[in-house]
Amino acid sequence: MSPGTRPRVFLVDDHHLFRAGVRSELGDAVEVVGEADEVPAAIELIAERLPDVVLLDVHLPGGGGKAVIEAIRPIHPGVRFLALSVSDAPEDVIAVIMAGARGYVTKTISGPELVDAVLRVASGDAVFSPRLAGFVLDAFASMPAGTELPGSLDPELDHLSPREREVLRLIARGYTYKEIARELTISVKTVESHVSAVLRKLQLSTRHQLTKWATDRRLI
Amino acid sequence: MVVAPGRRDHRCIADQIKSDSTQWDRTPPGAPNRPAGPSDGSADKPSLGGRPPAGPPSGPPWTMPRPAPRRAPRHGTWNVDAPGPWRGPPFARRRHHQRGLLYRSRDDRIIAGIAGGIAARAVSDRRGITLALALVPALILVLLLASELHAGFLTSLGLPLVVSASGLVLIYRNAEDDERTWLNGAVEALFQLGAAPRRPRRAFFTRVGASLLLLGLGLFVFADGGRAHSAFRPLAGTLLVMAATVVLLGPWWMRLARDLVSERQARIRAEERADIAARVHDSVLQTLAMIQRSADHPQEVAKLARAQERELRSWLFEGQAPGSFGAEGPATLAAGVQQIEREVEAAHGIAVDAVTVGDSPLDDELRELLAAGREATVNAAKWSGAPSVSIYVEVEPKRVSMFVRDRGAGFDPEAIAEDRKGIAESIHGRMQRHGGTALIRSVPGRGTEVELSVPRRSGRG
């Protein structure tokens, strides 16, 4: 996506009313190029229209949002996914992030915030909701620093740096990237790179450990 | 008589007739003495060793309630005027025992409950009593025969047999239809002797044979004693007869016990269903009704739906029933935070986003932290004008922190208004009393953040 142009957005959600609501909230800031309400249709249409960002419901009939990401990412790595969910179950959230989503926001997010999140994902950054930041802090807290995980190629991946931890903590406290930058007297770009680094760790870290954490935290 | 274990809160369906003279009639034989009416210290004392506490004096002792022994309280003075279970003249109870007055235990259908209810009715059954009394000549005949045959053991067996028979007659005559069905089922089982459907015949004959052998042996030891030492004679005989009874009736008793367990499980399930129905009615249905009424106010609808969603979610997934604050209260920090989230959303129509990292069982310090945090959240909801409040709680090995943040109006903490000082004071003071800290950061136009923190006493859990 070149700067100045509107990102092309695709909506996947099984609730018609919700899709209509998101469409109107996004307004003119983005170009909505299509919608789907189930996994096979979503895969087909996304492959055909190649949007910049897919707004993806975590819970979908026919395999969930995870199935869509797993089908699209190998063949079209340029398509980015932003997960949307009413579900606060860590298992679902972690699963969709590990599948390759660039971020996660709850459906209660306000219109301008959603637009902001879509633009951020479109430009290649990660978007963490406070809740996701909390999950990540929780997951990495259960792996104390200095412990070598079996089978881990890069121990760096299994731990958060103090700065990353600080950034995540501020996100969890409800700070925007701009506010975090001011609080820590760093640039917004640096904040973004910290969040992207955390996302990378999430996606590449010892999967077994993360999955176990999510299962332990399972609420249902 | 099999007396069922377990709770036996007896309720009289005709409970309107509440007087001291009827109180003691509600307690079945063998049941703990729990008078339903007003009670004082003496009436609250449980009866001696599960003995039948009270009841009509006539009838066989094992089916009919007996008057409780008068017993002074262990300590304190004896209050003669106390409305104890034994109080009231014996004849006064008669008028409350007309036929059709149904006494039934809460455990419904438990044998003692049925027998208790029946026993209460049986007292007024004059024909039944006459019938039972008609067995007295039979008893005399048995005794005569026994003395003629020099069979002493018949005398000792004859009396309980006749008393039992008359009691059974009374019970059966006075049973309601459904109770009679139950009794029939129980007796049928006795005839089948609890035999399994497979190989019933063989098991039956084996058991009857074994019990007959034991019974014969026991009676022989009773009567003759064989060569056993005379002191052991009654003991050995009793043991053998008891063994015979166990072999013969054991399966039946076990079936009764099993039935009792399954009855109780069914009852628990039914109670749970009723509980769920009541809660759904109180929460979801009420909210739906309110949403219908306020369909013209989208804000109100959103607020109601949000609060209800949280409540339902925490009920379904975390087992925290709606409205359980106060008496039970949350058990952990995370549950407490969710409670604040729910309550403030419901009361102030503002979105509260809470994130909790780690969790800990609640102790006094953490309760104070939650109380101060709730205060801060309510303040944000009331004064900030922001559409949402964020709560972040983090449990660390050495301390627990709580952040409450809004992006609302904010204020200048230096030039703090007098009317807000009290609130800040209560948050500050509360935290200081419990070894914690409170920090309020606010910039006019940018919002407010309250940071609370207490040291952690207990180890990481």
Image (spheres, coloured by chain):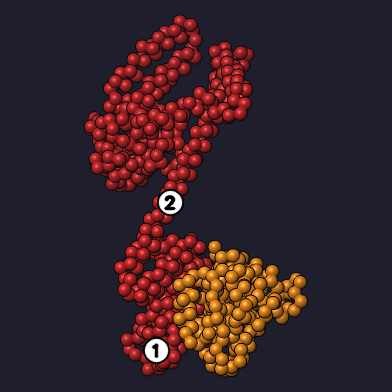
Of A183 and B227, which appears nearest the observer?
A183
Give the percent coordinates (x, y) of residue B196.
Answer: 58, 29
Which chain identifier belongs to the red chain? B
- The disc label shown at residue B209, or none: none
Colour representing chain A? orange
Q: Earlier in the sequence, mark 1 or mark 2?
A: 2
Crowding at label 1, few (<14), some or many (≥20) Cα neighbours within 10 Å? some
Q: Which residue shows up at 44% across the image and 7% down it?
A: B145
Q: Position of residue B380 (x, y in %)?
A: 40, 82
Question: Mark 1 sits on what residue?
Answer: B409
> Horizontal placement of B269 versus A128: left or right?
left
Q: Residue at x 46, y 29 (%)?
A: B186
- Picture layout, residue B429 above or below residue B7: below
What is the distance, in whole Å, between disc 1 and disc 2 at their CAs?
48 Å
Residue beneath label 2, please?
B273
> Horizontal and vertical percent for residue A106?
51, 76
Q: Report whether mark 1 lies on the same chain as mark 2.
A: yes
Q: Secondary structure at mark 2?
A: helix
